Image (cartoon, coloured by chain):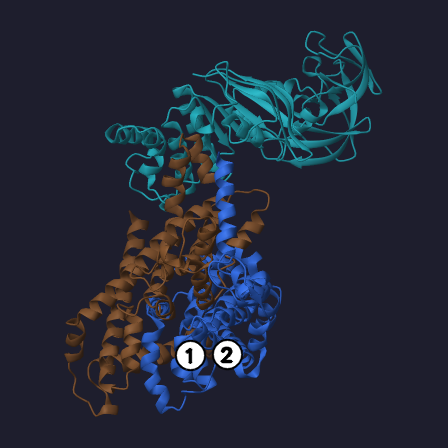
Chain colours: A brown, B blue, C cyan
Amino acid sequence: MRFLTLMEKLRVPLMIFPAVALICVLFFGGLTVGLGQSLGYFPAIGSYNLTFQYYSDVLTDSTFFESLWLTFRLALLSTVSSSVLAIGIAMVLRQSFKGSRFFTFMFQLSIPIPHLVAAAGIVLLVSQSGLTARIAYALGLINVPRDFPVMVFDRPGIAIQLTYLWKEVPFIGVVVLAVLQGVGPQYEEIARTLGANAWQRFRYVLLPLIMPGVLSTSIIVFAYVFSSYEIPLLLGVRYPTTLPVLAFKNYQDPDLSLRPQAMAMSIILTVIAVLLLVIYKRLAKYAVNS
Amino acid sequence: MQKIIRWIVLISLVVVALAPILPQFVWSFSHRWLFPSLLPSEWSLEPWEYAFSTSSRVGEAFISSMAIGIVVSLLSIIVGLPASRALALYDFRGKSVIEWLLMVPIIVPGIVATMGIHQVFIRLRLTDTFIGVCLVHLIPCIPYMVLVMSSVFANYGTDLEDTARTLGAGPVSVFRYVTLPGILPGLLVSTMFTFLISWGQYITTVLIGGGSIITLPMVLFPFIAGTNYSNAASISLIFVAPAILVLIFTSRQLGRESAVMGGFGKL
Amino acid sequence: MTTVVLRDLTRRFGNVTAVDRLNLEIASGELVAFLGPSGCGKTTTLRMITGLLLPISGDVLFDGKSMITVPTEKRGAVMVFQKHLLFPTMNVGQNVGFGLRMQGVEKKEMNRRVSEILELVKLPGFENRRAHELSGGQQQRVALARALVVRPKVLLLDEPLANLDANLRLEMRELIRSIQREMGISSVFVTHDQEEAVMLADRIALMFDGVLQQYDVPQAFYQKPLSTRVAHFFRNDNALAGTRRGDVVETALGTLRVDAARVQQPDGQVLVTVRPEDVRLNPEAGSPNCIQAKVLLVVYMGTHTQLQLDVGGHTWLVHSDADFQARVGETIPIELPASRLWLLPAN
């Protein structure tokens, strides 16, 4: 009997222990080591004294802020435009029509494709000698590659954003579609009999219903773009580059004294990401309660 | 009018979905393809011959990518399934803290923890090893598995399991005949996601694998960076193939199983 | 105040005809029940009145004007669904005010009308509650208020009470009835519960398999059913075959007198029917229309006793006083009062 109650008590801890332990050791362990180094605890170079020196180094460096701004701008633009497009396409795909399964499949096509492959595809498509430029030439719109707008290795990062759009619109869209299918048609029917036109039904009935899902997936997308490394490295300009690229460059530098700075950048990146999650959680709560 | 808009949306959807992929087929068979010709001026099987040669290390990379992906997916299931069940079906003290712990790695850039853990792995001699790479891939994979599967478990509930137990099924039978069939569609999709997260990892593998463990993205990266698009295309297509197969396998679930995709909506 | 006319309304789903050439008039301010087993086409008809579903042929007229080309949101036919389905993203006040907000009614006016209608459904001051905090009955009342506040031309209720427990259902019935009377809104409600239809409706439209069987006041379904199916739906299976000649019907058990002014079947083959509660047990000796019946089963029902009798090979149900004594197997005389007999067509 006592054994049974003990098992009952231990059940939940036993179930969550492996996952929590692995994440704590690997993720939070790594984070702690990083935090230590960013504060100057770096035995490998004989540094044991805690200092905020590296944070002030980073925070007084304009390169850091340019990178931060670029990273933030890329993440925000990609997230907002992905969400808007995803909602629009999901609204079309939820209707029942002939071939809707085929189109839903095509919509999902880019979800499993690795970001690197997407990046390669986008370069082949929109670089100045890419397929779009060739079609523009064939149509007589341009004469030489130079006439075609620069979208790769450009400061605005158009190719980077196109890559993310291509990857993330279906991701958000599939979630929105799932929510919409769970909702069913009845709320809209009620709204309709109460006199709501098509726009009002979308704005006041459907949008509030899908908003939690959209917010949640868009925070995932934002975080993903925010931590992007290989895409901006491949498709973006050398300077300014995104924060993860900058941090990793400092980390890999033969000059080991740059490592604490890389770690300080990482920790700042982490703090921003967690802050965003907290704000999102508050927002979501507020949206539910008001 | 609505129909016209619908078809415009649908057709552009198909065009946009295929535009970055289909040209890579053509590139993978091209030898010379200069601006402004719309098709290659010289065709060749060279990119494919290169991809399948041992010197390209594509085959080797494919095998290690696949092995890492499978090991990581299995570990994520073993570790993630009980945790997601506990989070979905039981109330306990500190639950919200646990939820936060398991969610933060989704939000925090993977490179951050990887740079930190790199130091520890060096001391534990886990760098440049298969196990080390698998472990570091687990950081983003476990949280996704938990996120999706706790939604699936919550949706499935315990009523059927309880019924089976009153009918005389033991814990193993309940899992085998009731729980597993119920969550299987969701498990398939979340395993696919986990596999693909591992399959697409680049910088974490570079850092922890240190060049001893070569995966497909590492072989592909230099060709894109070096604008050797023919070779990039053939390797890209090899890189994409399993992913597309997985999608065909799970697309029905993806479209229908609202609890699964709903999981992403419950961060 | 709106009259509703359904003219030859037809709807098919694939090969199945869900509603077949339905003709019906609903007078202004009338409360009509669409009654029938599930799948009989009553909800389909309701949806065609709202315009959520378009008929294949036929017409829906409000006050004599065809509504076919008018979209749902402009018809003013408001639906209350079986599940209460309050918008989960809004509180009670926002739910009730939804229709007014869609019309662009000014906020002050909207709040006034919302609180007024909430008082009417006996939920005063509930504006800031959230839907999931309410009980099932309260949610149903909010859904009703949400429909009523826009002053609909036609109010449509799809099994509005199906999810409520017995006591609550009774309460809600009275509330719906009194509000509907007070506001004089032409209303239709769908139900499969004949008792509910009888208690609430001015007139009942009974449907089977997409076809309207009988459209009349509730009493008619008890006293003057048009077919054995209608009689059966209202729990009357007591029938005896015979041949009508003027004011008598010859049956195997003897000659029965009928009220010629009341019954409608022409001379010839008919079925004689009488409701279980109209059969007289213990008739006085020499009463007309007496026949012999064998007792098959006696069941005490509290307020009455129910007998199963063998009447000329047919099994009849008969209600008697609660203290009626009879033994199974015994043969007893029963009287079928001429004024209560009704004739159905022989099939």
Indicate the secondary structure of the residue bearing disc 1. helix
Q: Chain of mark 2?
A: B
The residue sitting at 29% across, 61% down in the picture is A155
The amino acid type of the residue labelled 1 equals: Thr
Asked whether the residues under the numbered discs 2 and 1 touch, taking CB atoms below 8 Å apart as contact, a structural biologist would say yes
Question: Residue at label 2?
Answer: B68
Q: Nearer the viewer, residue C328 or A280?
A: A280
The residue sitting at 31% across, 29% down in the picture is C104
Q: Is residue C137 above or below residue C215?
A: below
| Residue found at the very far right of the displayed protein | C252
Q: Is residue C141 above or below residue B105?
A: above
Compared across the picture, whether C235 is left or right of A63 comes to right
Whether residue C84 can be seen here: no
Q: Nearer the viewer, mark 2 or mark 1?
A: 1
Whichever of callouts 2 and 1 sits on the residue coming sooner in the sequence is: 2
The residue sitting at 40% across, 58% down in the picture is A145
